[in-house]
Image (spheres, grey):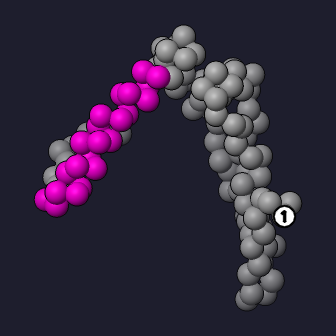
Amino acid sequence: MVLRPVYHRKEERIRAHVLLCWLSPLLVRIAEVNTKETWPQLRSELEGMHLIEYESTDGKVYQRTEITEGQKRILFLLKISEPAKILDINLFRGSKRRQTSKETI
């Protein structure tokens, strides 16, 4: 990742940028306090969780990787519910496309 200057001209974008710059370290600190781990430790554990897109001639499936015990513990301590195993399924039928959400699985 390369850092570069951010130029905003509209006041609403400047305010949003400042808010994000303030919110990010706050969320990091909350995570550190609630888990009693450093941010590098948390990040190292959580970066193994991925969303994978499987595609075939029948459609696409969006599925997350298995959650490790360390990731489960972090999510529990932060009071964050486990992400759904299957996020979305898109089935193709010829030129028509049918979408099925995780609620109907």
Residue at position x 69%, y 21% in the image = 73
Residue at position x 64%, y 34% in the image = 80
Q: Is residue 65 above or below residue 43?
A: below
Residue at position x 64%, y 42% in the image = 50
Residue 67: x and y, percent? 74, 32
Decide whether the magenta segment is chiefly helix, strand or loop: helix
Residue nearest the observer in this picture, 8 or 63: 8
Residue 91: x and y, percent? 79, 73
Does the stretch in magenta take in 28? yes
State the image quarter where residue 13 is shown.
Answer: bottom left
Residue 75: x and y, percent? 65, 28
Residue 83: x and y, percent? 70, 42
Residue nearest the observer in this picture, 65 or 27: 27
Residue at position x 43%, y 25% in the image = 28
Mark yes or no: residue 41 visible. Answer: no
The magenta region covers 9-30
